[in-house]
């Protein structure tokens, strides 16, 4: 029999909220199959089962929280097996409105009677934030899947109320996390290099995953990082400090979500073909926006790409995502005048800005990386593995 514990889905995670179980007691579950959805201060993450067997008991109710490492379920080979004891279940933190009802009545909140209309779906973080702000989440318009009220919806409703009253509103958990990380980034000695490149999409076979300019830039970035590995590195705070050159390229992609930014990671990106990059990029973008990232999707990044071209931005500089040592800011692909064989012609170009940690690599390394990247944006072979 296997005890399932609340996973640590990030270096800073100390507690998680179990949004929902995707399996019920008695269900067969395969190792690696999605078992539950867990919410951190950054995102909702789909939790994969650590073992195969039957889910014989859950120790944590939906929308309750538990510390990382706390027991949350039992999985056994025999569906009729009895778990050793349910007395070890972790203390659960009910949703704020349920907690108030329990305190006021002295009993557990009752479930809605059959046939009664269901309550508006509200995420656990949204319930917590609404309780802190004195808002009724039932009166907040939900923009999540199925009309689910998210923490962002609660914050927007509160900010609108504060604006009407002329008072500032508090930051969401995601905004606080971003603020802390970017404050840490601002303390890094950073330099920037800018280069404009002609970009040419390769021919693509019918019926195969279609790649975009973003996919091509991710593929080319991964290839360039293998050629200039000093850029695919990180600063290690120790005594004495050191620089770690990463053996693989785990490429982060900045994805805008409600009220913030997530950076899911495409693992071992340099080993992927352009088509596989396209598939993985679509998967992590969709998962980030739907709150269904997998454990590990937000961890292990070695370099980040931030693309604001779709927003019409020609050129910008991005802050490093620590502990990484570099980030590439990508502007819009537009036809611009270039000289080809002595002739002035219009060609699609993109402006690239590399921000580097000067403690880890120098300007010449950055220039070599950009040169390798630009070379891969032309017509070379991109079949990969």
Image (tube, grey):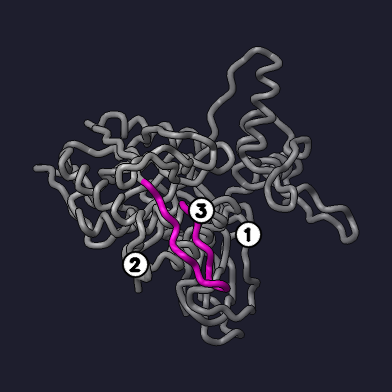
Q: Is disc 1 placed on a helix, strand or loop?
A: strand
- Tag 2 near tag 3, CB within 8 Å: no
Q: Is disc 2 placed on a helix, strand or loop?
A: loop
Q: Quarter of the image holding residue 54?
A: bottom right
Q: Nearer the viewer, residue 211 or 31?
A: 211
Residue at coordinates 24% horizontally, 32% vertically from top-left?
A: 191
User: Residue 88: in sight, yes or no?
Assistant: no
Is residue 104 left or right of 33 when viewed as pictured?
Answer: right
Is residue 36 left or right of 340 when viewed as pictured?
Answer: right
Task: State yes or no: residue 115 in magenta.
Answer: no
Where is 189 relative to 11, above or below? above
Q: CA distance from mark 1 to mark 2?
A: 45 Å
Task: State yes or no: residue 212 in magenta.
Answer: yes
| Label of residue 20 in the image | 1
User: Residue 193: in sight, yes or no?
Assistant: yes
Q: Main secondary structure of the magenta part?
A: loop
Residue at coordinates 40% horizontally, 32% vertically from top-left?
A: 316
Identify the residue position indicated by label 2 in the image: 381
- Tag 1 near tag 2, CB within 8 Å: no
Q: Residues within 10 Å of mark 1 (few under 14, many from 20)?
A: some
Image coords of residue 379 (percent x, y): 36, 60
State which tag comes first along the sequence, 2 or 3: 3
Which of discs 2 and 3 lies nearer the camera? The answer is 2
Q: Nearer the viewer, residue 125 or 312?
A: 312
Q: Magenta part of the protein: which range?
A: 198-213
Residue at coordinates 48% horizontally, 58% vertically from top-left?
A: 281
Q: Is disc 3 placed on a helix, strand or loop?
A: strand
Which of discs 1 and 2 lies nearer the camera? The answer is 2
Residue at coordinates 36% horizontally, 50% vertically from top-left?
A: 11
Identify the residue position indicated by label 3 in the image: 66
């Amino acid at each position: 029999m296997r005890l399932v514990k609340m996973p640590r889905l990030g270096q800073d995670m100390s507690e998680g909220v179990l949004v929902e179980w995707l399996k019920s007691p008695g269900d067969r579950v395969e190792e690696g199959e999605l078992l539950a959805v867990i919410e951190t201060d950054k995102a909702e993450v789909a939790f994969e089962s650590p073992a195969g067997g039957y889910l014989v008991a859950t120790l944590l109710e939906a929308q309750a929280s538990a510390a990382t490492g706390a027991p949350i379920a039992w999985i056994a080979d025999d569906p009729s097996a009895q778990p050793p004891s349910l007395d070890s279940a972790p203390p659960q933190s009910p949703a704020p409105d349920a907690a108030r009802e329990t305190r006021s009545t002295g009993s557990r909140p009752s479930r809605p009677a059959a046939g009664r209309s269901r309550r508006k779906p509200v995420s656990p973080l949204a319930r917590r934030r609404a309780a802190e702000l004195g808002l009724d989440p039932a009166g907040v318009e939900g923009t999540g899947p199925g009309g689910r009220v998210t923490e962002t919806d609660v914050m927007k409703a509160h900010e609108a109320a504060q604006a009407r009253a002329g008072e500032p509103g508090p930051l969401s958990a995601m905004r606080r996390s971003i603020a802390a990380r970017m404050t840490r980034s601002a303390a890094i000695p950073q330099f920037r290099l800018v280069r404009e490149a002609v970009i040419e999409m390769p021919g693509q076979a019918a019926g195969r995953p279609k790649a975009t300019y973003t996919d091509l830039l991710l593929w080319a970035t991964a290839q360039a990082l293998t050629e200039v590995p000093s850029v695919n590195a990180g600063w290690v705070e120790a005594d004495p400090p050191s620089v770690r050159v990463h053996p693989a390229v785990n490429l982060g992609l900045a994805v805008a979500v409600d009220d913030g930014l997530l950076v899911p990671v495409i693992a071992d990106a340099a080993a992927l073909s352009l088509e596989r990059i396209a598939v993985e990029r679509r998967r992590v973008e969709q998962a980030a926006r739907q709150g269904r990232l997998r454990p590990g999707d937000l961890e292990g990044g070695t370099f980040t790409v931030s693309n604001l071209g779709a927003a019409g931005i020609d050129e910008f500089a991005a802050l490093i995502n620590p502990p990484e040592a570099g980030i590439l800011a990508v502007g819009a692909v537009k036809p611009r005048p270039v000289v080809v064989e002595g002739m002035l012609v219009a060609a699609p170009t993109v402006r690239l800005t590399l921000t580097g940690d000067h403690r880890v690599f120098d300007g010449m390394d950055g220039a070599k990386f950009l040169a390798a990247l630009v070379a891969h944006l032309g017509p070379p072979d991109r079949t990969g593995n």
